[in-house]
Image (spheres, grey):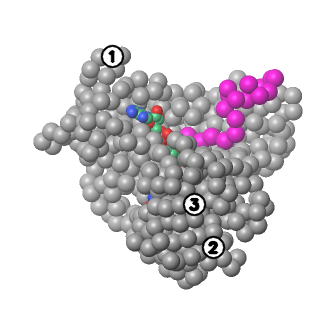
Amino acid sequence: MEKYDVFVIGTGIAGQTAAKICCENGLKVAICDNREFGGVCANRGCDPKKVLIQFSELLDYSRHLKGLGIEKLPKINWKAIQKLKSKFTSKVPESTEKNLTQLGIDIYHQSPEFIDKNTISVEGKKITASYFVIASGRVPRTLHIKGEKHLKLSDDILNLEKLPKTATFIGSGYVGMEFACMLNTLGTKVTIIEKGPKALKAFDDYLVNLLVKKLKKDGINFIFNADVSRVERLTKNYRLHYSENGEHKALKSRQVFNTAGRVPSTDVLQLQNADIEASSKGVDVNEFMQSTSQSHVYACGDVSSASLPLTPLSGLQGYIAANNIIKAKSKTFSYPLVPSTVFTSPNLSSVGLSEADAKSRYKSVKIYQGDATDWYNARKQNAKIYAYKILVNERTDEILGAHLLSTESNECINILSMAITQKMTTAQFKKQIFTYPSYTNDLKAMLKKED
Ligand SMILES: Cc1cc2nc3c(=O)[nH]c(=O)nc-3n(C[C@H](O)[C@H](O)[C@H](O)COP(=O)(O)OP(=O)(O)OC[C@H]3O[C@@H](n4cnc5c(N)ncnc54)[C@H](O)[C@@H]3O)c2cc1C
Ligand SMILES: NC(=O)c1ccc[n+]([C@@H]2O[C@H](COP(=O)([O-])OP(=O)(O)OC[C@H]3O[C@@H](n4cnc5c(N)ncnc54)[C@H](O)[C@@H]3O)[C@@H](O)[C@H]2O)c1
């Protein structure tokens, strides 16, 4: 029977970070994955997605300037784009394995199953470890509808051989909105069907409404409050059945994508054999990223109950878990401020408190909100929408939350994130000198006029 100090499940950013730190500190470490090594972000998430999306962004940008200096729109070569994307993804599994092995970490290519609290079985072997790190991430939610097997997933979108003429997306969260926007810009006729009353429910209503309005003008069909029930295969197309206000409806498209969210990947691990508690939120952990039920088990990244499933947090949680294995309770996870961006055209970005949360926590909240479409930066690129909402504590003048909708919001939001972390007042922020002309410089102007 093989024996390790630490056995890590999952080779994404969380698992790799934890494994490397444990190994560098002299522990005997093994790591496993039931898919290609390297995790979602590098293989089938953030990185390949942005390689593809930069082309739809470029096309959207060019469309705005057509007739104003651009005569012909760029012609998209999807095959070449896929080739470019593969240059980023194809080497990830091999280089990840090589890197881990060179450090002296043993690797396994299968999902393990817990046999008891200290024993797992993997690749037909029984293995014991003093500590386990569960870093198995999330997988697409199953919808439990008839014909589910016909639904394609985000992996399939990233690997599309050709752009479909028509496509339906079930779910209008990050994944659905980003890919729907990309395909629509590249020429696919897109419908988004959402069970709730709005898209991107975690984001600011004012900005989401403006984004949805822009995307509708671009040709995306949105259906809200819909209950999907069945997918049917036709000769060339698929028909999705759903009900809206109790009325049965159906729509036909070449592809139907399930973008209805992701759930913790714990199904096959047999956690119950080791009495490790997990819920629909993931493996239950405390502030040390330690399982609340088994002190020798840690969970980090998307699979942990403390996750907000974004890459930067997964790395941080992997770091915390490993450090606590090396020295018990030496590091705590205390929900840092996390900026995030939905990579639609334009980008929707957010950091800190929402308007509702700010108002419930603070007595008096100033709201700096506006449509900046007629400001210089948007006008020069003939952008269709540019808007913002920044929330400020009236008593202290500190910035509490920021929400931006613009082509550059994915970068600008980081400036506001730093300002909030540093507890900057708007007076201090406005004293900063930024480059001109720049979207960053506009942030100061946003804080001038209260809504
Ligand atoms: C399409 C898409 C786009 C995204 N874009 C962004 C973005 O732009 N920015 C951002 O911050 N985040 C983005 N995310 C989220 C981001 O990818 C995740 O938050 C991040 O990858 C999580 O890292 P992790 O290490 O926790 O888990 P993962 O990267 O999911 O790694 C978990 C690993 O565990 C393996 N595994 C799962 N189950 C088992 C098992 N039973 N046994 C063995 N191994 C197992 C998996 O194969 C995987 O390799 C995106 C996600 C998707 C799906
Ligand atoms: N740019 C980024 O940072 C980025 C990009 C992609 C994913 N992510 C991360 O991955 C996570 C998962 O993203 P996601 O888009 O898969 O999930 P999500 O939770 O953001 O969105 C899922 C959407 O599907 C809807 N839905 C659920 N069941 C449905 C049903 N039966 N019919 C119709 N609609 C249904 C939900 O109401 C929701 O609007 C995100 O929370 C985010 O943290 C981040």
| Residue at image coords 55%, 71% | 128
The answer to if 20 sits in the magenta stretch is: no
* Whole-percent x, y for residue 99 in the image: 54, 78
Residue flagged by tag 1: what amino acid is it?
A: Gly
- Disc 1 is placed on an element classified as loop
Q: Mark 1 points at which residue?
A: 246
Q: Which residue lies furthest to the right in this view?
A: 396
Tell which of 438 and 109 is nearer to you: 109
Image coordinates of residue 373 in percent, x first then y, are 57, 33
Q: What residue type is labelled 3?
A: Lys
Residue closer to the observer: 116 or 207: 116
Residue that mark 3 sits on: 117
Q: Residues within 10 Å of mark 3 (few under 14, many from 20)?
A: many
Dot 2 crowding, Cα within 10 Å, few <14, some 14–19, many 20+: some
Q: Give the range drawn in magenta.
A: 344-365
Establish whether ligand 1 lies closer than 8 Å to the Cβ of label 3. no
Q: With 359 as the anchor, is 50 left or right in this view?
A: left
Numbered disc in front, either 3 or 1: 3
In the image: residue 293, left or right of residue 165: right
Position of residue 162 in the picture relative to residue 33 (left or right): left
Whether residue 100 is visible, yes or no, is: no
Residue wearing tag 2: 5
Going from the N terminus, do you reach mark 3 or mark 1 first?
3
Asked if marks 2 and 1 touch (Cβ < 8 Å), the reply is no
User: Residue 304, how many percent across, how many down?
Assistant: 59, 50
